[in-house]
Amino acid sequence: MKDYILNLVIFGLTSFIMIIIGYFQYRKKDRPVGFWSGEIPPDDIEDVTGYNRVHGRMWIFYGIAIFASSLIGLVNDSPLILTGAVFLAVFGGLIAMIIVHYRALAKYRKK
């Protein structure tokens, strides 16, 4: 049981960081946010608030998915299922975030 508590603490902190990133990106209104590490955000965004809200929601959902995947360890006693759920949340979520980012760029860039 202590392994699951440690699991929840680690994934909870990680998820909390992702949700905080999402919250601040969601609330930012003055300039576009970046997605990639070291990326200079584009200057040609028409609706900065809408673009930032898409990115903010994306990070919030990613944090929630990571935490929800760790809760499977409390419900199911199989380490294989827990590992699969975490793998799906982390890597599947990352792929989904990349898709959402490029769709937001296509939608909110000046034409």
Image (tube, rainbow, N blue to C red):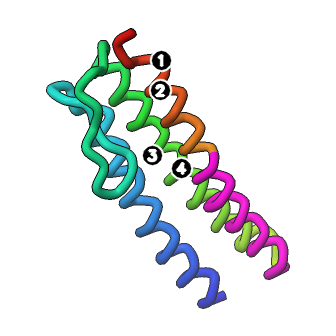
Label 2, residues with CA under 10 Å away: few <14, some 14-19, many ≥20: some
Q: Amino acid at mark 2?
A: Ala
Q: Is residue 43 magenta?
A: no
Between disc 4 and disc 1, the foreground one is 1
- Which residue is identified by label 4? 62
x and y, in percent, of residue 69 in the image: 67, 61
In the rendered structure, which disc, 4 or 1, sits on the residue that comes first in sequence?
Answer: 4
Q: Are marks 3 and 1 in contact (CB under 8 Å)?
A: no
- The image quarter in which residue 22 lies: top left
State the separation of the CA atoms marked 3 and 1.
18 Å
Q: Amino acid at mark 1?
A: Lys
In the rendered structure, which disc, 4 or 2, sits on the residue that comes first in sequence?
Answer: 4
In the rendered structure, which disc, 3 or 2, sits on the residue that comes first in sequence?
Answer: 3
* Of 91 and 1, the residue lying toward us: 91
Is 64 situated above or below 7? above
The residue under the point 28% across, 56% down is: 38
- The image quarter in which residue 73 lies: bottom right
Q: Are marks 4 and 1 in contact (CB under 8 Å)?
A: no
- Residue 91's disc is none
x and y, in percent, of residue 96 in the image: 62, 43
- Residue 104's disc is 2
Q: Amino acid at mark 3?
A: Trp
Q: What span is colored magenta in the figure? A: 78-95
